[in-house]
Image (cartoon, rainbow, N blue to C red):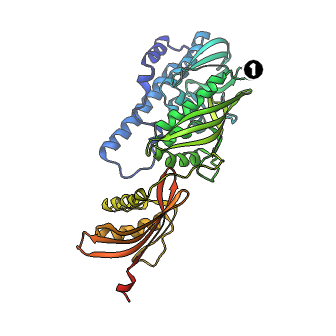
Amino acid sequence: MKISSTAIAASFAYGASAFAPSVNPSRIGSPSTAASSTELDLFFMNTLKHKRAVSKVNKPARVKDSISEQEVRGLFELWNSALATGDSRVVASRYSKNPVLLPTVKDDPRTDYDSVKDYFDTFLLKKPQGTILDGKVHIGDGWATDMGIYEFTMGATGDKVKARYTYNYVQEDGVWKIQHHHSSVMPEAVDMGKPITPDEVRGLFHLWNDALATLDPTKVAARYAEKGVLLPTVSDKARTDFHSIREYFVNFLQLKPQGEILESHVTIGNNWCQDAGIYEFTMGATGKKVKGRYSFVYVFEDGEWKISHHHSSVMPEPTMPQAITEEEVRNLFQLWNSALATEDADVVASRYSKNAVLLPTVSDVPRTSYDLIQDYFVGFLKKKPQGEILESNVTIGHNWCQDAGIYEFTMGATGDKVKGRYSFVYVYEDGQWKIAHHHSSVMPESIL
C-alpha cells in the first residue's frame, strides 16, 4: 500500500476547523418537538458535514500497495486529527467494524462502534492532542502494529499525560483501520501516585467554588467523581450519582452561594487526598452568612482530581436564632402580597416552605404540597386579590415566628372587599423566611 503523503498533509492542514461539527453531536437524531424547515436544513447540513469529516479523516488511509513504517506512523496522525475535530463519531470511524479498544481510564473493553464512540464522548471534552515520544512499528501481510509511549496535552486544562500504547491496524474495505487499541497509564507513575501539595489540595476547593459561581448545577455536579457521594448540609438524602447530585444543586444555587475556607486540615495519600475543616458561605441572594463543617475526599480520575466524597453539616453547638423584629415579621406578609400581585401561582407557591400546610379560605382541601398550593392559587388569583392587614398579633421563637389576626382583600376583578381571619407561621429555611403554615377563614359572625 502507498498512503499518499500529500493526502496526509492535506488532512493535517484542515485540522479541527475542517472537521468540527457546527452543532452538538449528541443532538443529531435526538427526539424533539416539531422542527422548523430551518432546523431540518441544519440537520441535513450537519449530517453532510459529518459524512465529509469521516471521509476526509479516512481517505488518506486507503490501501494501495505496500505500507512503510513512516506511513504506519501517519495512521496515528490521522487518529490524532480525528481527535482534533471534537466529534466522537469521526474518531470512532477510524476503528474497524469489530474493534477492541482497551482505553486508558476505563475498565470495560469497547468492542463496537457505539461503545467506542461512548468513550470518546467523554474523553474529547478534555480537548486532547497526542504526540508519539517513542514507538516501534511492525508490518505484516495486511496488518501493521505501532506500539510505544505517547503524551497527550489536554487543551481544556493544559495538563500533560503520558501513557503506553499499542495500535494494530488492518485492511478493511480498502482502508487501513484500527482493529485493536490498547492504552495504559505509565505503571511507575501509578506506584508513585499523582503528586499534589497541601496548597494544591486546598486549591481544589476553589475549583468547586468557581463552579458554584456559574450557577449551573451541571457544572457543579461535574466536579464530583463518577461514583461520588454527597451528604449535603440541608438534605437528608445521600446523593450517590450525577443526577441526584445535580438535583441538590438546582435548589442550593438559587441562594447564589460563595464559600470561603476558615479552617483546613489536609491529608495526602496515593492518588487521593482529603481536606476537612470549617467553611462559611455568603448567600448572594439574601446576604446571609452560614458556617458549616466539611470533608472533601478527592481522587485522581480521568486525568484530574475529582470529589469522591463530600460531607457538609451544620455547626452542632447551639446557635443564635435568626434575628427578626415584629415589624419584619409583619413585612413578611407584604412579600406574600407582592407575590399575589404577580398573578403567577408558581411565584405565590414559592413563598411556602418545603413541608408547608395551607388551609385556605374557600376550599375544604388541606394543601400539603407545592403542587396543591399552586393549584389553589391558580383559581384564587383570577380575582386579582390584594390584601391589607387590619389587626396583627406577632410571636417570635427560635427560627420561627407567627403573625395572626384579621386581613381584608380587595378583589381587583370585581371590586369586592372581603375580610378574613389569618394565621401565618414562618420558619427560617434555606437562608430565608418561608410560610410553614397558613390558615385563613371567613369571619364567623357574618355566616352565623
Q: Quadrant of residue 17?
A: top left
Q: Residue at x 57, y 50 (%)?
A: 320
Which x, y percent locates residue 432? Answer: 47, 52
Q: Secondary structure at mark 1?
A: helix
Q: Residue at x 57, y 20 (%)?
A: 159
Q: Residue at x 68, y 21 (%)?
A: 195
Q: Quadrant of residue 176?
A: top right
Q: Residue at x 40, y 31 (%)?
A: 49
Amino acid marked by disc 1 = Met
Which x, y percent locates residue 132? Answer: 61, 14
Residue that sits furthest to the left in the current view? 415
Image vertical order of residue 309 relative to residue 130, above or below: below
Using residue 286 as the reference point, say whether residue 260 is left or right of it.
right
Which x, y percent locates residue 80? Answer: 54, 21
Q: Nearer the viewer, residue 181 or 72?
A: 181
Which x, y percent locates residue 183? Answer: 67, 24
Residue located beneath label 1 in the image: 192
Q: Nearer the viewer, residue 349 or 188?
A: 349
Using residue 143 as the reference point, say whether residue 53 is left or right of it.
left
Disc 1: CA contacts within 10 A as few (<14), some (14-19) or many (>=20): few
Residue 100 visible: no
Can you say which quadrant of the picture contains the C terminus? Answer: bottom left
Image vertical order of residue 423 relative to residue 144, above or below: below
Q: Quadrant of residue 227?
A: top right
